[in-house]
Image: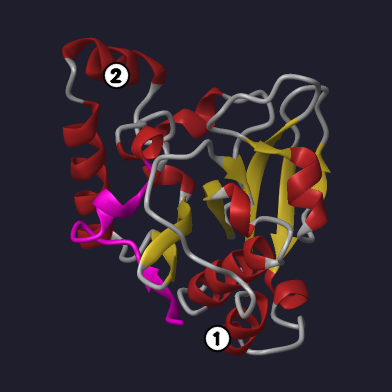
Amino acid sequence: MGRRIAPLTLDNLGDLPLPCRSCVFWELDPVSARVAEESGKPELEKEGWISAVLLEWGSCGRVVYVDELPVGYVLYAPPAYVPRSSAFPTSPVSPDAVQLMVSRLLPGYQRQGIGRVLVQTVVKDVVGRGFKAIEAFGAAGRETPSCLLPADHLRAVGFKTVRPHHRYPRLRLEARTTLSWKGDVEVALERLLGGARGGPRKEPALRPF
């Protein structure tokens, strides 16, 4: 069984689940996102955003594969590349941190620790670029917007609240905490996915981590 985590590029952008391939919630400001959706061209905007970030900053995502089936992904970037981040009441993201925008796993691969491995992979990447942490806007309460990560899930993988809010707290994961987790990323992924079984590819409902 093949298992790997690959950088997100224009070549594998199509491996993101269908709702996420055309979602520009984070990539555009609210007005521009609405215009893109109304014009029927959000996929092109998504591709343009990925291309620009890759050229100017570098890798901004990871995709998890099992037997070449994409089972999850994570997207992240400095807040300067994430226009929507300034719209939150708990903004801005700290200048020494990269923003974790969104992370999703297919239902059959949840609660196996894969989300934690993805986060660890992101932290190792951004530390190499001089950042000290990753931050995210969590969603609290009964209703969770589809493009936001539930605050409880973020806390479950080690995030701590740095600016509380009844709906959109901002949470932070220090790099030194994450890099102290035991096990190399590849070894951890091998162990976590050892019992997984990939099935026919379809477009299932997505859930965070």
Q: Quadrant of residue 185?
A: bottom right
Q: Is residue 138 magenta?
A: no
Give the x, y percent position of residue 173.
72, 60
Give the residue type that dot 2 points to.
Ser
Q: Nearer the viewer, residue 195 or 43?
A: 195
Type of colouring: secondary structure
Residue 91 found in image quarter: top right
Residue identifier under label 1? 186
Figure label count: 2
* 183 left or right, relative to 98: right
Choose between 198 and 37: the one closer to the eye. 198
Other residues around mark 2 within 10 Å, as few (<14) / some (14–19) / many (≥20): some
* Location of residue 182 with respect to 125 vertically, above or below: below
> Residue at image x 76%, y 39%?
151
Q: Is residue 10 magenta?
A: yes
Disc 2 to disc 1, how far (Cα)? 39 Å
Query: Residue 159 in the image: x percent, y percent?
Result: 77, 55
Residue that badge 2 annotates: 32
What span is colored magenta in the figure?
1-17
Local packing at callout 1 (Cα closer than 10 Å; few below 14, some 14-19, many 20+) is: some
Q: State whether residue 6 is above or below residue 56.
A: below
Residue 34 seen in the current view: yes
Q: Residue at x 75, y 47 (%)?
A: 153
Q: Position of residue 143 (x, y in %)?
A: 72, 19
Q: Is residue 62 visible?
A: no
Q: Which residue does the image show at 49% across and 79% down from the upper left? A: 128
> Please, what is the three-letter code of the amino acid marked with disc 1?
Glu
Sequence-wise, which precedes: disc 2 or disc 1? 2
**Mark 2 falls on what kind of element?**
helix
State whether residue 136 is above or below residue 147.
Answer: below
List x then y, in percent, for residue 118: 57, 66
Q: Residue at x 37, y 52 (%)?
A: 201
